[in-house]
């Protein structure tokens, strides 16, 4: 039989063997995080740097943009390679037109 967490025992609802109250709370948190990310993107739309203008000065992870794939996170490798790659640094991504530094983590996440 499905379990209901202690927090939601007074008004239990079960779906897919999980407490629906916990599922709803998780979804609400995801929506909140996505809204914060969207707000951050809107505030920084002008912070995109064209790869034609310059590449990052430091190796690390960056938000990048291609017309085909949209916005995604890549790793920038400096030195002689100077390329945006997958997160492990293996495959180079073609077609990246713009980049920007990653945002700082949410203040709530820093306190946990």
Image (cartoon, rainbow, N blue to C red):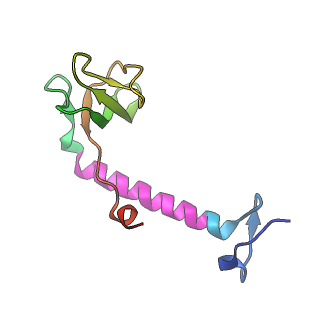
Q: Residue at x 26, y 17 (%)?
A: 81
Residue nearest the observer in this picture, 59 or 71: 59
Would residue 34 be counted in the magenta stretch? yes
Magenta residues: mostly which secondary structure?
helix
**Residue 102 horizontal/vertical position (percent):** 29, 44
Q: Is residue 30 above or below residue 73?
A: below
Q: Residue at x 34, y 27 (%)?
A: 66
Q: Is residue 96 left or right of residue 32?
A: left
Q: Is residue 49 above or below residue 15?
A: above
**Residue 105 horizontal/vertical position (percent):** 34, 55
Magenta-highlighted residues: 24-44
Q: Quadrant of the N terminus?
A: bottom right
Q: Which of the 4 image quarters holds residue 90? A: top left
Of all residues, the one furthest to the left in this rendering is 53
Q: How many numbered marks appear?
A: 0
Q: Residue at x 70, y 73 (%)?
A: 5
Residue nearest the observer in this picture, 81 or 74: 81
Would residue 36 be counted in the magenta stretch? yes
Q: Which of the 4 image quarters holds residue 91? A: top left
**Residue 27 horizontal/vertical position (percent):** 56, 60
Q: Is residue 54 above or below residue 20?
A: above
**Residue 73 horizontal/vertical position (percent):** 37, 36
Q: Is residue 6 left or right of residue 34?
A: right
Q: Quadrant of the C terminus?
A: bottom left
């Amino acid at each position: 039989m499905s379990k209901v967490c202690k927090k939601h025992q007074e008004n239990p609802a079960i779906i897919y063997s999980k407490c629906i109250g916990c599922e709803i709370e998780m979804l609400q948190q995801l929506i909140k995080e996505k809204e914060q990310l969207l707000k951050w993107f809107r505030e920084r739309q002008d912070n995109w740097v064209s790869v034609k203008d310059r590449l990052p000065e430091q190796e690390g992870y960056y938000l990048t943009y291609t017309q085909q794939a949209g916005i995604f996170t890549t790793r920038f490798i400096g030195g002689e390679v100077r390329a945006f790659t997958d997160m492990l640094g293996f495959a180079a991504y073609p077609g990246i037109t713009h980049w920007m530094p990653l945002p700082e983590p949410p203040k709530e996440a820093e306190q946990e």
